[in-house]
């Protein structure tokens, strides 16, 4: 009754195309936007989760030649990194959420992640986000990865550790860099603020968008060094 009244007073609009939603429509996207989401489907690299060609081996060549520090990484949505026209429904919401003021969009992103949760929540003791440098956090006001991590932890009843990791220095944008340069760019960029909370723990590290995995791998490396049992990575979107 209350929600019907709220729906009448504040009609919900689709987060993708702004069309008015049916009062009883589940979620925050209209059916046509929902149908356009590019979910990542098998076969995926067993280690880093990047899509593989059908018939390829269990792991991608990058993981075979240079193993990452995390045990495995998974993402739920394909993110086209080559410009706004190709970014897709969820990519557009990610960008508008990150650089805009519409915080309601965070709920849509969390729903996408929860709907296709590719990892078993019971396998983890705690959820932690990839941190932003404090200057960037201060300018932007929030960390998209931390919002996702907090929502995920609440949904699955896991402990959430917002400040387990911190960024020692600002890293220049990874966007225009190759694989090796990305790894070099983030080397020693992270520190563990609370090592006692990590000892023997099974960690789920959350990020909004993952590209080569260099950032997540460096975070995992310092967490393992600080005593974590293992680190898995979950990103909403994978730039491919
Ligand atoms: Zn729509
Ligand atoms: Zn891989």
Image: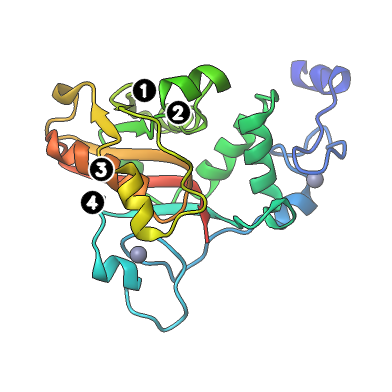
Out of 46 and 30, give the one closest to the viewer. Answer: 46
Out of 207 and 179, give the one closest to the viewer. Answer: 179
For disc 3, the neighbor class at 10 Å (few under 14, some 14 to 19, many from 20) is: many
Reading the chain from its start, which is encountered first: label 2 or label 4?
Answer: 4
In terms of image quarters, where does ligand 1 lie?
Answer: top right
Residue 145 coordinates in the image, percent (x, y): 47, 33
Q: Which residue is mark 1?
A: 162
* Alpha carbon distance from label 3 to label 2: 16 Å
Reading the chain from its start, which is encountered first: label 1 or label 4?
Answer: 4
* Alpha carbon distance from label 4 to label 3: 6 Å
| Mark 4: secondary structure | loop
Q: Quadrant of residue 222?
A: top left
The numbered mark at residue 146 is 2
**For residue 142, side relative to residue 57 (left or right):** right
For disc 4, the neighbor class at 10 Å (few under 14, some 14 to 19, many from 20) is: many
Front of the two marks 2 and 4: 4
**For residue 222, side relative to residue 19 (left or right):** left
Q: Is residue 240 visible?
A: yes
Residue 205 coordinates in the image, percent (x, y): 34, 39
Out of 106 and 191, give the one closest to the viewer. Answer: 191
Q: Residue at x 41, y 53 (%)?
A: 74
Out of 139 and 239, give the one closest to the viewer. Answer: 139
Asked whether disc 4 touches disc 3, contact meaning CB atoms under 8 Å apart, the reply is: yes
Q: Residue at x 46, y 47 (%)?
A: 174
């Amino acid at each position: 009754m209350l929600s019907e009244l709220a729906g009448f007073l504040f009609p919900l609009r689709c987060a993708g195309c702004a069309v008015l939603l049916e009062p009883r429509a589940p979620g925050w996207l209209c059916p046509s936007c929902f149908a356009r989401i590019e979910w990542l489907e098998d076969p995926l690299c067993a280690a880093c989760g990047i899509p593989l060609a059908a018939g390829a081996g269990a792991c991608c060549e990058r993981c075979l030649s240079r193993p990452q520090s995390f045990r495995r990484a998974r993402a739920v949505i394909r993110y086209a990194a080559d410009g706004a026209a190709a970014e897709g429904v969820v990519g557009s919401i990610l960008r508008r959420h990150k650089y805009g003021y519409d915080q309601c969009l965070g709920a849509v992103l969390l729903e996408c992640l929860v709907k296709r949760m590719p990892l078993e929540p019971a396998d983890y003791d705690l959820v932690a986000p990839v941190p932003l440098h404090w200057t960037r956090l201060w300018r932007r006001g929030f960390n998209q990865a931390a919002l996702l991590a907090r929502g995920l932890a609440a949904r699955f009843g896991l402990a959430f550790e917002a400040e387990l990791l911190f960024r020692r220095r600002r890293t220049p944008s990874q966007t225009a860099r190759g694989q090796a340069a990305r790894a070099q760019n983030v080397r020693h960029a992270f520190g563990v603020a609370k090592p006692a909370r990590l000892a023997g723990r099974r960690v789920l590290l959350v990020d909004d968008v993952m590209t080569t995995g260099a950032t997540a791998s460096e975070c995992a490396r310092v967490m393992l060094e600080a005593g974590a049992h293992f680190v898995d990575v979950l990103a909403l979107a994978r730039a491919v």
